[in-house]
Image (cartoon, rainbow, N blue to C red):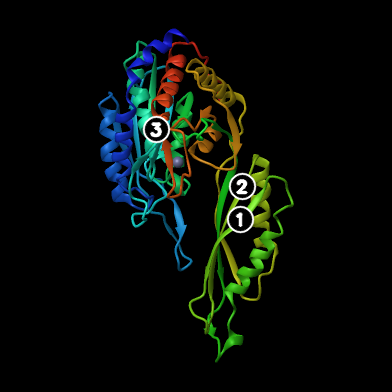
Amino acid sequence: MKQLRTHLSSLDGLTDAMVQQTTDWALINSGTPNLDGIARVAAAVLPSFEALGFQAKTLPPAAATTVNRDGDIVPLTRGPVYHLSNRPDAPKRILLAGHLDTVFPADHTFQYVHLKGDKLHGPGCADMKGGIVVMREALRCFEASPFAGEIGFDILFNSDEETGSHASSPTHEHFAQKCDVGMVYEPALPDGSLAGARAGSGIYTFIVKGVAAHAGRSFHDGRNAIVGAARLITAIETLNGQRENCTLNLGTIKGGVASNVVADLCLVVLNVRGRTPSDMKWIDDNVRGLIGSENFGPDISVEIHGGVHRPCKPNEGGTLALFEAVKSCGAELDLNIAWAPTGGCCDGNNLAAAGLPTVDTLGVCGAYIHSADEYALKESFVERAKLSALVMMGLAAGEISWPDRV
Ligand SMILES: [Zn+2]
């Protein structure tokens, strides 16, 4: 590994350029529903990878549905998945993944970037436009090394990671089957730690329907969907605490039109988390079982939309071997790479569930993501690009053994 380090010197001194590139991309709003903004980010990002010899393709989003405010299940509008690849005949392939979207809608007030001390504040600076810059510079360094011809890359940039990758996870699962290692550029923690095991997650929308009526003239003809939803919520809440590591969070509720109308519609959204596949099955069975067995009131119907969309990501087998390889590369660079389990999820969950050994926090170090305090640590840009490039070189040069697929 020591002599591989000599090939990393082209990354020295790039901090300012990487910070500037991140700033330029972060100033383009790309909240998940802002398809124009996502297309503009793609138009800025893709040519800089094509310049490294990658072929770009735009893949349409997979069909997915959502529930609209009227309680109807309708098609979900999402941006495409952008795929870049090189050396299609290479015997070993690395899948690199990032997302172009952020959690900040176009009308959010957090639309500026500023460097304060060692922190680059801005929407997506850590999650993950800074990560995409790290990925690109690592690739630039790798592609100029003597090992470049040994392996090929597939890169996926999706447009809907922040809302659960409902229209992109089939594409991730497809390429996960064709590759040998997954590297995802979500941010690491400020101390450099990576996310190890990840929880699984599911989102359920309950469409509770009753019968509308005037609250004064014909109250008894009405069937109140809000009351039905209250019974449902109480039943769901009884599941919390029944099984360790399983949580069910009632996130939003919307129902009713006016105080003098018996509400005929109420929408309840639930987010669930568990640590193992059997946790997720327990949650799913129990949530669906409630709908079949409970009575929410006469003439009240409850329909479920959604389910588990992020399978659990245990840190074991090939994934753990890959973590160990990243740690040993970190040691070569005087970086102490640790990892800890998290309740958060990302595309790494879906890649690992498809059998691909995956480390998913190879981006910049940063904190307060998904808030207006988000920042990326300036000094982590070059350091993390070196880490990724060394992992790529280690695999390509045979210094790191390719981990077994799960
Ligand atoms: Zn992210």
In the image, 223: left or right of 29? Answer: right
Q: Residue furthest right?
A: 242
Tell me, yes or no, whether the two marked residues, 2 and 1, touch with CB atoms within 8 Å: yes
- Where 95 sits versus 329, above or below? below
* Whole-percent x, y for residue 139 in the image: 35, 23
Q: Of callouts 3 and 2, which one flags the residue occurring earlier in the amino acid sequence? A: 2
Q: Residue furthest front?
A: 117
Q: Nearer the viewer, mark 3 or mark 1?
A: 3
Q: Of callouts 3 and 1, which one flags the residue occurring earlier in the amino acid sequence? A: 1
Residue density around tag 2, few if under 14, some if 14–19, many if 20 or more, within 10 Å: many
Q: Residue furthest top?
A: 3
In the image, 276: left or right of 193? Answer: right
What residue is disc 3 on? Answer: 378
Q: Residue furthest bottom?
A: 217
Q: CA distance from mark 3 to mark 2?
A: 33 Å
- Where 127 sits versus 266, above or below? above
Quarter of image, ligand 1: top left
Question: Residue flagged by tag 1: what amino acid is it?
Answer: Asn
Q: Quadrant of residue 143?
A: top left
Q: Nearer the viewer, mark 3 or mark 2?
A: 3
Tell me, yes or no, whether the two marked residues, 3 and 1, touch with CB atoms within 8 Å: no
Q: CA distance from mark 2 to mark 1?
A: 9 Å
Q: Which mark is residue 249?
A: 1
What residue is disc 2 on? Answer: 273
